[in-house]
């Protein structure tokens, strides 16, 4: 009986470790200046009013992006704390983990994730000077 409980426990741990969640820092990525972003991404960012506090954590550029990807906050088991953010491809079930502390908003467009290098660049910063890291989602 103890062996079967131990086996089930080990199997559960192994299953959790093999889940299809990728930490974005291990994905193929490159740094881009604002003018190097795809035109649709530039248009989306340029359309946001200065100091708009209603900006979501994730900006989906196209309607298909908001259908293909889901964003959620993963919280701790105990307490009201947040562990990390997760963007999940709704077609494949693959998830992408974004650690706390990354500047926002995260921009999703055409199976790519764009993360700015600066916080609050909509308020006081010239957004055209912000650099973005482009991650290729699998």
Image (cartoon, rainbow, N blue to C red):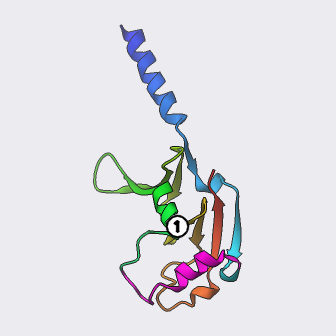
Image coords of residue 95 (percent x, y): 52, 48
Pointer 1: residues within 10 angstroms few (<14), some, or many (20+)? some
Residue in front for this viewpoint, 67 or 33 = 67
The residue sitting at 44% across, 27% down in the picture is 12
Q: Residue at x 64, y 61 (%)?
A: 135
* Residue that sits furthest to the top in the current view: 1
Instruction: Name the side, left or right, on which 131 lies relative to 14.
Output: right
Residue 6 position within the rendered picture, expressed as x and y whole percent measured from the top left: 42, 17
Residue at the spot x=57%, y=90% of the render? 126
Instruction: Tell me which segment is drawn in magenta.
Output: 36-53
Residue 75's spot in the image, x, y percent?
36, 52
Q: Residue at x 39, y 85 (%)?
A: 52
Specify whether 78 is left or right of 46.
Answer: left
In the picture, measured across the screen, residue 19 lies left or right of residue 29, that is left
Q: Is residue 118 left or right of residue 100?
A: right
Circle 1 sits in a helix, a strand or a loop, which is it?
A: loop
Q: Is residue 41 magenta?
A: yes
């Amino acid at each position: 009986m103890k062996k079967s409980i131990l086996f089930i426990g080990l199997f559960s741990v192994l299953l959790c470790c093999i889940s299809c969640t990728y930490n974005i820092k291990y994905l193929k990525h490159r740094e881009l200046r604002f003018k190097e972003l795809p035109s649709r991404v530039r248009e989306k960012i340029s359309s946001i009013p200065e100091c708009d506090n209603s900006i979501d954590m994730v900006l989906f550029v196209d309607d298909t992006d908001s259908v293909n990807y889901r964003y959620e906050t993963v919280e701790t088991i105990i307490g009201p704390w947040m562990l990390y953010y997760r963007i999940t491809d709704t077609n494949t079930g693959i998830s992408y983990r974004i650690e706390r502390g990354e500047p926002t908003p995260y921009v999703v467009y055409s199976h790519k994730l764009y993360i700015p290098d600066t916080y609050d660049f909509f308020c006081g910063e010239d957004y055209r000077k912000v650099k973005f890291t482009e991650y290729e989602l699998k």
